[in-house]
Image (cartoon, rainbow, N blue to C red):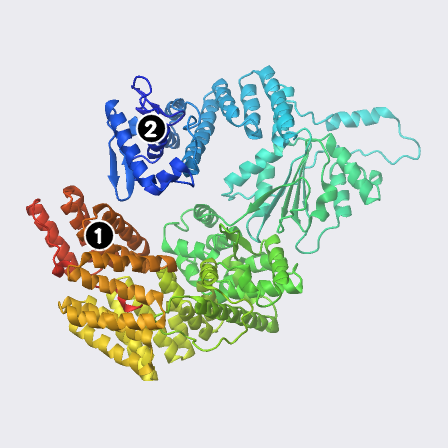
């Protein structure tokens, strides 16, 4: 295979070229930057960062153009067919997969993975070996590595490490241990302090029969870690060293003298005296106390592998101790018992099982010591009465034996610390509902619920052959109700197995009712509620109160800050830490700021709702009210700090009902909304489920300004649909009108015209019914926009005029400015620039008087549209630049997307092609990300015309086609037809002069309707 033309997997290399045609540093950095992102446009900013880090010169853009020209010349002279393309998005180098070693490497890596998954290991090994051979050192090691490259280089190096691991496994699997050792040795030259690599090298050399080299490698590892890091080797590396020392002897580690021999020696030592205890005549058998393994055990393969590697690691110094923790019902005991049966042969001196009853009446450690010593065949008269001496005796006995001890259902680390071995080859597996982070020397393994595949497999296995089909909706509903909790799945599976008259569909129907779901999840002595009760009973009163509150409140993820309203922050944090420790609450995510979000399993949530007496349950609902009240008031305080005046009906406009201990500034308010965003929808659902419907709709309404600014359409829909139901439940017609109006506006944004019409009509009717003139005006603007977008401009103008009248009546200048701006779009569509200009001038003055920068920026957009209509494109550009700067500074991506589309159009008309293309591409991308097809279609239509003007006909065809599809998806057949007409004209005559007359330009957008 010919080597690729370009190489970055090592020093930068141009193959098949005599000498070094590319010597200058900056063009080499530029080429490397482009090759790290092949066939993709790299922005000028990223290239500048790569060439000058954080201090680019003022002439950076011009310098880059110079370097690109020089690079093109060098590549052309060298006969390398790699065109460098230029666009508004930056620069791109086009290379085939076989022309760049990094691309070929990734292709071979994927091929090897597919072959291995298909069971063709030898072919996979060949493909991966070819990929490995492409590496000549660290990527681009001959160049200065800027921060801009780190992400790409880290990805390549991570892929290389994964390649070595996969190739290592394959070479060992197919008997090439020597080849495996070569791979690891190469990795160690790059990372000589990786203990896992040293351990694998020792094991590979042993597998190859090179015992002396294995011992030397272990010695070098110990010396390297000691000399360079001043640390001792870890347990796994020490175990590998011990294996090398013993030459892979099957007798290592020597478990001591076999039990029979020990007995013989004891008998020979001395004859019993007349006062000696009677000699035992029963044969001394090794303990084998493991409970029955579950025949239908399934899942947890990865956990079993981890545990087996740990307990069978044969560490000559540190006995392995594993703590398996998890929430009630996650299958901790089943996993430990399955492990015990799997590794019985590795523990010839016995397997001991003790139930420590940690969740009920914790067993005394001293009594547990006695039980273990008796299990090891020590006579009871020889066991010391002092607990510390018993513990010392157990350590002595275990030092010369190889015993597996399973300690099930442990309460605390202190309960089992006396039972831990001190040295030797025995192992201990502990299961606990608590994490036991303070158990010295233990490795922790936390169990969560099953994944979907494991859950379905367990259900089918327990229910029996043909009893339930995982692909049916009934099975999916059953598993969803169980929350993939193994205990719950085992219960429902057993019920299906024992009740042939109970169909999966009927069981699914019974599980839908949350109030009785826990009752359904019980059979015999198995019950989810009973299991959860045991953990709940271990909580103190403060912890139990927080548990009940979370059950009522946490319909989804939540933050700790949201709970701090019921007590001091330190008290809430302490109680929450305890709930995490006992696995009743788990950490869901941790963001880049280190802020955690938490989650309670759905079945535990139902348990928390039902636990406690009547007064405690009432206290939980009261606590929920306290929490949602605090959330609502904090949203109100944050809203007051926002610079953008919201165009909509707020649920509260008067003074705050609670003190403001730490007033927000605008930056803090937006940051708080961003950080707590995932809390609000669950809080709304929680308020509704606890009958606090007024809080539910008010919170939904209160964070409307933030949702509008951030274009949070998904959260908007979910929160307001629940808010609407709660407003109806609470009988609050005004709240119902607010929810309808906001949902109508969302429908306009998302091109859901039927929903928009329904909700806006309802809002208008109810606002009129309750006598809210401001609400009349708000809903009239929404209806006007709907009518305008649906091709009924005259009716739309009537609604806008109605809105202006309402806003003037109530003295709301912001609303009047919005309505006048919206009305101007109708006049402009009629080619009445004089009237349109008058409306816009009045809107502009209103915005200036209000000192509302956002409103002024929106009016400037409309003025720019007027200027484009008049052919005064340079004036339009000035207005739009002002608008875009304002929107960007306020963090309003949605309005900024429209401003970019308009500015791209105006720049195109001014002949600034590159700047226009960048603006239009950015606008399309933002529109696609936000789900606003209107701005995406508008920008795509302009971009198609731009490509035609620049002679890029193929891209023109593609872009017009995209614009037509986007407008059709938006339900705007008028604009879709206009795009198709332009596309058809292009197809008929590629040299046609393209229409860009006033009649074909979009003149309005959905944002006009709200701000």
Which residue appears at 65% of the width and 48% of the height? Answer: 436
Figure quadrant of the N terminus: top left
* Residue 591 is at least partly visible in this image: yes
Question: Which of the pair 36/386 is nearer the observer?
Answer: 36
Please tell me whether mark 1 sits on a helix, a strand or a loop.
helix
Relative to 1001, say whether 68 is above or below.
above
Residue 994, x across and y down, in percent: 10, 51
Relative to 191, say whether 818 is above or below.
below
Residue bearing mark 1: 907
Q: Is residue 380 left or right of residue 238?
A: right
* Residue 932 is at least partly visible in this image: no
Residue 896 picture quarter: bottom left
Residue 747, x across and y down, in percent: 29, 65
Residue 538, x across and y down, in percent: 66, 58
Q: Is residue 605 left or right of residue 426?
A: left
Q: Count residues near mark 1 (Cα–Cα under 10 Å), then give few for <14, some for 14-19, many for 20+.
A: many
Relative to 990, say whether 346 is above or below.
above
Question: Which of the pair 337/746 is nearer the observer?
Answer: 746
Please tell me whether mark 2 sits on a helix, a strand or a loop.
helix
Which residue appears at 30% of the width and 73% of the height? Answer: 846
Q: Distance between the Cα atoms at labels 2 and 1?
A: 41 Å
Residue 760 picture quarter: bottom left
Residue 5, x across and y down, in percent: 30, 24
Asked if the residues shown at circle 2 and circle 1 are in contact, with their CB atoms under 8 angstroms apart, the answer is no
Residue bearing mark 2: 104
């Amino acid at each position: 295979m010919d080597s690729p033309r370009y190489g970055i997997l090592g020093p930068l290399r141009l193959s098949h070229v005599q000498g070094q045609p590319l010597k200058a540093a900056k063009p080499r950095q530029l080429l490397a930057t482009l090759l790290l992102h092949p066939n993709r446009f790299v922005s000028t900013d990223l290239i500048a960062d790569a060439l000058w880090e954080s201090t680019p010169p003022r002439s950076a853009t011009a310098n880059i153009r110079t370097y690109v020209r020089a690079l093109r010349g060098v590549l052309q002279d060298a006969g390398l067919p790699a065109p460098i393309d230029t666009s508004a998005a930056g620069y791109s180098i086009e290379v085939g997969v076989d022309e760049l070693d990094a691309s070929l490497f990734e292709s071979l890596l994927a091929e090897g993975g597919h072959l291995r998954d298909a069971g063709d290991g030898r072919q996979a090994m060949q493909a991966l070996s070819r990929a490995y051979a492409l590496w000549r050192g660290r990527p681009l090691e001959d160049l200065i590595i800027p921060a801009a490259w780190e992400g790409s280089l880290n990805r390549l190096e991570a892929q290389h490490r994964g390649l070595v691991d996969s190739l290592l496994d394959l070479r060992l699997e197919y008997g090439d241990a020597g080849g495996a050792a070569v791979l690891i040795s190469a990795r160690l030259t790059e990372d000589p302090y990786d203990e896992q690599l040293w351990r694998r090298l020792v094991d590979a050399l042993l597998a190859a029969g090179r015992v002396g080299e294995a011992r030397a490698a272990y010695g070098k590892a110990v010396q390297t870690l000691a000399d360079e890091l001043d640390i001792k080797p870890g347990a796994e590396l020490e175990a590998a060293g011990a294996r090398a020392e013993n030459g892979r002897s099957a007798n290592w580690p020597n478990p001591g003298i076999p039990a029979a021999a020990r007995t013989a020696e004891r008998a020979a030592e001395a004859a019993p005296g007349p006062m000696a205890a009677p000699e035992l005549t029963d044969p001394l058998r090794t303990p084998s106390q493991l409970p029955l393994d579950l025949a239908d055990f399934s899942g947890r393969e990865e956990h079993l592998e981890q545990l087996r590697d740990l307990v069978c690691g044969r560490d000559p110094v540190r006995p392995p101790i594993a703590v398996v923790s998890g929430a009630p019902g996650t299958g901790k005991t089943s996993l430990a018992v399955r492990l015990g049966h799997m590794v019985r042969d590795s523990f010839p001196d016995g397997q001991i099982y003790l139930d420590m009853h940690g969740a009920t009446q914790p067993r005394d450690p001293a009594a547990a010591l006695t039980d273990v010593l008796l299990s090891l065949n020590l006579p009871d008269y020889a066991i010391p009465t002092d607990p510390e001496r018993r513990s010392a005796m157990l350590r002595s006995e275990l030092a010369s034996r190889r015993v597996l001890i399973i300690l099930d259902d442990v309460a605390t680390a202190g309960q089992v610390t006396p039972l831990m071995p001190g040295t030797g080859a025995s192992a201990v597996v502990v299961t606990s509902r608590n994490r036991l982070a303070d158990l010295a020397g233990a490795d922790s393994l936390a169990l969560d619920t099953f994944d979907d595949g494991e859950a379905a497999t367990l259900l089918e296995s327990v229910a029996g052959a043909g009893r339930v089909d995982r692909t049916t909706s009934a099975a999916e509903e059953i598993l969803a109700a169980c929350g993939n909790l193994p205990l719950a799945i085992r219960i429902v599976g057993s019920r299906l197995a024992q009740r042939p008259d109970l169909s999966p569909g009927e069981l699914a129907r019974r599980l839908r009712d949350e109030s009785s779901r826990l009752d359904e999840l019980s059979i015999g002595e198995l019950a989810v509620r009973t299991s959860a009760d045991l953990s709940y009973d271990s909580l103190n009163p403060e912890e139990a109160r927080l548990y009940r509150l979370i059950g009522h409140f946490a319909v989804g993820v939540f933050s700790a800050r949201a709970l701090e309203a019921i007590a001091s922050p330190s008290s809430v944090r302490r109680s929450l830490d305890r709930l995490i420790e006992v696995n009743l609450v788990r950490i869901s995510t941790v963001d880049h700021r280190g802020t955690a979000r938490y989650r309670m399993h759905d079945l535990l949530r139902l348990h928390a709702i039902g636990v406690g007496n009547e007064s405690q349950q009432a206290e939980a609902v009261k606590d929920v009210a306290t929490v949602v009240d605090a959330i609502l008031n904090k949203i109100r305080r944050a809203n007051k700090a926002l610079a953008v005046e919201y165009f909509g009906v707020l649920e509260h406009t008067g003074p705050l009902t609670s003190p403001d201990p730490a007033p927000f500034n605008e930056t803090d308010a937006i940051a708080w909304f961003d950080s707590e965003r995932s809390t609000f929808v669950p809080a709304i659902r929680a308020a509704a489920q606890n009958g606090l419907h007024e809080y539910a709709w008010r919170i939904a309404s209160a964070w409307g300004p933030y949702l509008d600014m951030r274009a949070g359409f998904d959260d908007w829909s979910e929160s307001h649909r629940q808010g609407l139901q709660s407003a109806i439940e609470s009988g609050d017609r005004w709240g119902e009108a607010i929810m309808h109006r906001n949902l109508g506006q969302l429908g306009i944004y998302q091109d859901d015209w039927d929903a928009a019409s329904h909700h806006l009509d309802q809002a208008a009717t109810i606002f009129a019914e309750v006598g809210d003139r401001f609400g009349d005006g708000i809903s009239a603007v929404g209806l006007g926009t709907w009518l305008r977008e649906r091709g009924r401009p005259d009716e739309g103008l009537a609604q806008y005029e109605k809105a202006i009248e309402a806003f003037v009546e109530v003295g709301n200048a912001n609303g009047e400015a919005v309505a006048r701006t919206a009305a101007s779009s109708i006049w402009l569509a009629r080619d009445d620039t004089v009237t349109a200009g008058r409306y816009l001038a009045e809107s502009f003055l209103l915005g200036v008087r209000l000192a509302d920068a956002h409103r002024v920026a929106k009016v400037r957009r409309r003025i720019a549209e007027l200027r484009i209509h008049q052919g005064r494109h340079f004036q339009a550009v000035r207005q739009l630049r002002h608008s875009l700067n304002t929107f960007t500074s306020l963090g309003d991506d949605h309005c900024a997307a429209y401003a970019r589309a308009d500015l791209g159009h105006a720049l195109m008309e001014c002949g600034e092609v590159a700047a226009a293309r960048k603006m239009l591409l950015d606008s399309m991308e933002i529109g696609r990300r936000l789900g606003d097809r209107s701005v995406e279609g508008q920008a795509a239509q302009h971009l198609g015309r731009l490509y035609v003007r620049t002679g890029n006909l193929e891209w023109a065809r593609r872009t017009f086609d995209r614009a037509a599809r986007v407008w059709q998806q938006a339900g705007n057949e008028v604009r879709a037809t206009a795009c198709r007409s332009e596309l058809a004209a292009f197809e008929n005559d590629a040299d046609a002069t393209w229409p860009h007359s006033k009649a074909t330009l979009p003149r309005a957008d959905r944002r006009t309707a709200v701000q």
